[in-house]
């Protein structure tokens, strides 16, 4: 009844091994998080660089035959017509995609 359990050398080693492996796992998880953050920062940086480079490469919008003779009101009407046409095309595409899903 008063006996005290003294762990054997092999159980101490297995416990030490368990702690060692736990610490290794923790270190690997931490390293993975560092790498993921580094990749994320790198991607954000390259996205910013591409955005800046793209804005520097843009030239002024060129006039087309369709817009050359239009005043501001005419440009607005043309823009609204183009947007309505795009909306109609999107609705048609949506119908096509929905019907394709049923096949």
Image (tube, grey):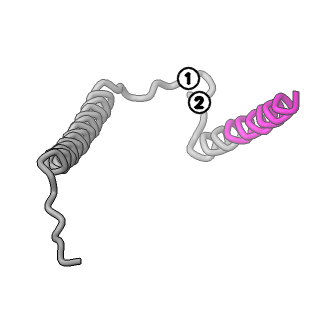
Q: Secondary structure at mark 1?
A: loop
Say which quarter of the image contains residue 91: top right
Front residue (pair 8, 54):
8
The single residue placed furthest to the left in the displayed view is: 9
User: How dense is the environment of label 2, judged by Cα within 10 Å: few (below 14), some, or many (20 and up)?
Assistant: few
Q: Is residue 30 visible?
A: no
Residue 28 percent coordinates (x, y): 21, 40
Q: Which residue is mark 2?
A: 67
Residue 47 percent coordinates (x, y): 31, 34
For the point 16% across and 45% down, the residue is 10
Label of residue 64 in the image? 1
For the point 17% across and 43% down, the residue is 17
Relative horizontal placement of residue 12, taking residue 99 as reference (left or right): left
- Range drawn in magenta: 82-103
Q: Is residue 57 visible?
A: yes
Figure quadrant of the N terminus: bottom left
Pointer 2 with pointer 1, Cβ within 8 A: yes
Residue 35 percent coordinates (x, y): 22, 37
For the point 19% across and 45% down, the residue is 14
Q: Secondary structure at mark 2?
A: helix
Relative horizontal placement of residue 60, taking residue 18 as reference (left or right): right
User: How dense is the environment of label 1, judged by Cα within 10 Å: few (below 14), some, or many (20 and up)?
Assistant: few
């Amino acid at each position: 009844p008063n006996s005290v359990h003294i762990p054997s050398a092999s159980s101490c080693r297995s416990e030490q091994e368990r702690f060692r492996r736990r610490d290794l796992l923790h270190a690997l998880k931490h390293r993975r998080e560092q790498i993921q953050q580094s990749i994320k920062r790198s991607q954000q940086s390259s996205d910013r660089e591409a955005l800046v480079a793209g804005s520097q490469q843009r030239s002024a919008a060129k006039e087309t035959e369709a817009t050359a003779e239009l005043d501001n009101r005419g440009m607005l009407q043309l823009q609204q017509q183009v947007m309505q046409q795009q909306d109609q095309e999107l609705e048609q595409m949506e119908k096509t995609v929905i019907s394709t899903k049923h096949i």
